[in-house]
Amino acid sequence: SEGKQIGRLEERNFSNLATGSLENQNYIFKTSGVFNQQTVIMDANTKSIIGKITYSGWKTRATLTNGNEIYYWKYDNTWQTRWSISSLSGLQIKYSGSNQGTIDTTSNDALLILCGLFVTNYFTQISIAVIVAVMVPIWMSAAH
């Protein structure tokens, strides 16, 4: 916020666990499954499940559930440098960037803001894994 770090999202590449904090609120994101992956969101202090993220089959959309509230995550452009979270009640959080960027929101919901960053990173890791899975056999066959 205004050039000052107010939160963090920490993940190990290709790990099923991430931690995030924003405005002194701490969360754990734990992903499970192989083909139909989902992520549970836990309060880091109590370890209680407070929400979940489910992903579309094509890994371009996600649904966030927090209590009785449902939010929708999606890319807003082809280059995947803009994305947003919205709800039927009109809430919208807009993100833009790649290595650094901006978040435009009137919401002070730290969990939703972190979820938008987490889902983007999750999809980026999936894309890298697919590229590696496709390219390694090609590189190996070219080396012979």
Image: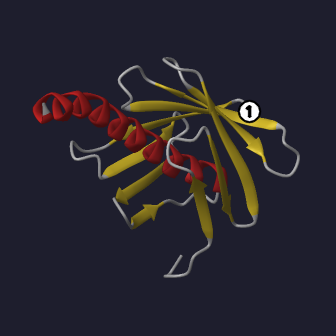
**Which quadrant is the C terminus positioned in?**
top left
Secondary structure category for the residue under label 1: loop
Q: Is residue 24 above or below residue 15?
A: below
Which colouring convention does the figure follow?
A: secondary structure
Please provide percent x and percent y for residue 70: 60, 31
Q: Is residue 89 above or below residue 98?
A: above
Nearest the viewer among 96 and 28 is: 28
Q: Is 92 on the left-hand or right-hand side of 97?
A: right
Name the residue rendered at 54%, 24% in the picture: 37
Residue flagged by tag 1: what amino acid is it? Gly
Name the residue rendered at 45%, 62% in the picture: 103
Q: Residue furthest right?
A: 46
Q: Residues within 10 Å of mark 1 (few under 14, many from 20)?
A: few
Quarter of the figure with residue 56: top left
Nearest the viewer among 127 and 43 is: 127
Q: Residue furthest bottom?
A: 3
Q: Number of labelled discs?
A: 1
Please provide percent x and percent y for residue 50: 76, 37
Q: Is residue 131 above or below residue 82?
A: above
**Which quadrant is the N terminus positioned in?**
bottom right
Name the residue rendered at 59%, 58% in the picture: 9
Q: Is 90 on the left-hand or right-hand side of 17?
A: left
Nearest the viewer among 90 and 3 is: 3
Q: Is 105 on the left-hand or right-hand side of 79?
A: right
Nearest the viewer among 79 and 94 is: 79
Q: Is 55 on the left-hand or right-hand side of 135?
A: right
Q: Is residue 93 above or below residue 137?
A: below
Quarter of the figure with residue 113: bottom right
Please provide percent x and percent y for residue 15: 57, 41
- Mark 1 — residue? 67
Please provide percent x and percent y for residue 109: 65, 54
Name the residue rendered at 62%, 72% in the picture: 6
